[in-house]
Amino acid sequence: QVQLEESGGGLVQAGESLRLSCAVSGSIFRISAMAWYRQAPGKERELVAGLTSGGNTDYGASVKGRFTISRDDGDDGDDDNTTVYLEMNNLSSEDTAVYYCNADISTSYHRRNYWGQGTQVTVSS
């Protein structure tokens, strides 16, 4: 069973930094892409950052230049031991939201999108 587990959220002051982690586990054949989304109260979920298996990145306009997405496949280099990170710098109150990890994963049986449970980031001004 594939699982995505986020960690690293919390309460920080405006201008500070935070790093989120998303650990992927399970019997995975391939991870085609990974991304971070966020959802603030009363707003729709939006893309924060995306990373393809080829290393291409994409960022939401409001976080470009402040956030960085990266991926670590662990010592064995296999996709079933992957962690994706979101380094967030110069945070503002507008970054307050629940952050969700997302991954496009192929197993032996199917290819589908998976979501983590979310981690709360709160930035006080």
Image (cartoon, grey):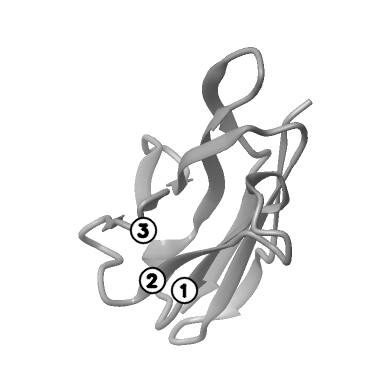
Q: Which of the two discs, 3 and 1, labels the residue nearer the N terminus?
A: 3
Residue found at the very far bottom of the displayed protein:
15
Q: In whole angstroms, how far apart are the C-alphas of marks 2 and 1?
A: 4 Å
Asked if residue 42 is positioned above or below residue 99 in the image, the reply reads above
Callout 3 touching callout 2 (CB < 8 Å): no
Amino acid type at circle 3 is Gly
Query: Residue 55 has which mark?
Result: 3
Callout 2 touching callout 1 (CB < 8 Å): yes
Q: Is residue 93 left or right of residue 101?
A: left
- Foreground pick, 6 / 23: 23
Residue found at the very far front of the displayed protein:
76
- Between tags 3 and 2, which lies in front? 3
Residue 115, quarter of the rendered image: top right
Query: Residue 60 has which mark?
Result: none
The residue depicted at 70 percent of the width and 63 percent of the height is: 74
Amino acid type at circle 2 is Phe
Q: In whole angstroms, how far apart are the C-alphas of marks 3 and 2?
A: 16 Å
Kind of element beneath mark 2: strand
Kind of element beneath mark 3: loop
Residue under circle 2? 67
Q: Residues within 10 Å of mark 2 (few under 14, many from 20)?
A: many
